[in-house]
Image: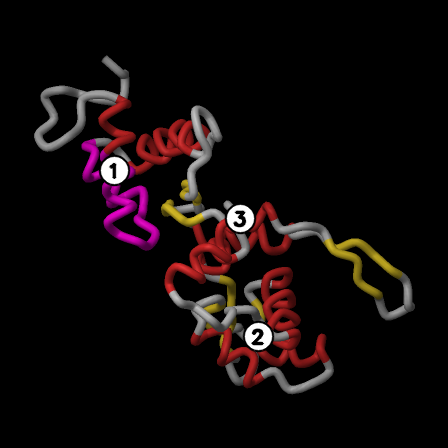
């Protein structure tokens, strides 16, 4: 008997193998991220234990042994999801008759990068960094659910703060904001400096709290 499971728990599972099967069934049926809280309730365990189970299941499911799958388990800070492997995107587009790509324009990528590395941040800050008005790009990213409002800045006018979403992590194949790569930017003196995702990580911690 796995230490996680109590066979006397009503509606819960009794083994790790059964938990893996239930997770696969639930995530496949959902088609979108499910929280560890909801999945834990389903398995009859706490959210923390559920997350631990998912982390044990993930490398097993995502392994290419005994054969490669077209589906992978993707984990986020508060949830997880089954997603198709990027390797097979062209086959999926053909099978589903998808002719247009979903690529983001350069302007949207610029705005998304500024938000990702400086979140939570305001549209005014994004405008300042880019040197142009970013209203259209910000609204487009909100519509695509890649960024979202997350409060108001304690400053005159109370401007809206924005942050990235779980869909942002999923689209870019990130488990966490900690996985954002460091980037080279030019400072006010014209020097190239490295910017790490530390600010974004702090924002993620604040989100968890």
- Please report whichever mark, 3 or 2, sits nearer to the chain's N-terminal start: 3
Q: Which residue is mark 1?
A: 40
Vertically, is 84 above or below 12? below
Horizontally, residue 167 falls left or right of residue 34, namely: right
Q: Quadrant of residue 37?
A: top left
Judge whether residue 95 can be spotted in this image.
yes
Horizontally, residue 177 falls left or right of residue 193, namely: left
**What is the number of the mark on residue 122?**
2
Q: Residue at x 73, y 82 (%)?
A: 131
Q: Residue at x 39, y 59 (%)?
A: 95
Horizontally, residue 169 falls left or right of residue 7, namely: right
Q: Which residue is mark 3?
A: 87
How would you rate the neighbour count of disc 2 (Cα within 10 Å): few for under 14, some for 14-19, many for 20 or more?
A: many
Provide residue 188's location: percent of width, then percent of height.
86, 70
Q: Secondary structure at mark 3?
A: helix
Provide residue 119's location: percent of width, then percent of height.
57, 63
């Amino acid at each position: 008997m796995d230490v996680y499971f109590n066979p006397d728990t009503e509606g819960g599972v009794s083994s790790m193998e059964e938990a893996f099967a239930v997770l696969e069934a639930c995530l496949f049926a959902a088609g979108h991220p499910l929280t560890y809280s909801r999945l834990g309730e389903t398995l009859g365990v706490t959210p923390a234990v559920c997350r631990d189970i998912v982390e044990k299941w993930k490398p097993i499911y995502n392994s290419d042994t005994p054969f490669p799958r077209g589906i992978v388990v993707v984990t986020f800070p508060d949830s997880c999801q089954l997603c198709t492997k990027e390797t097979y995107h062209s086959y999926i587009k053909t099978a589903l008759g998808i002719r247009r790509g979903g690529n983001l324009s350069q302007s949207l990528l610029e705005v998304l990068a500024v938000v990702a590395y400086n979140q939570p941040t305001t549209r005014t800050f994004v405008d300042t960094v880019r040197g142009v008005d970013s209203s259209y790009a910000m609204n487009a990213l909100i519509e695509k659910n890649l960024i979202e409002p997350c409060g108001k800045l304690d400053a005159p006018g109370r401007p809206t703060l924005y942050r990235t979403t779980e869909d942002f992590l999923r689209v870019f194949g990130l488990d966490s904001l900690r996985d954002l790569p460091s980037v080279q930017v030019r400072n006010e003196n014209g020097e190239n400096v490295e910017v790490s995702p530390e600010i974004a990580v702090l924002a993620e911690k604040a989100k968890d709290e």
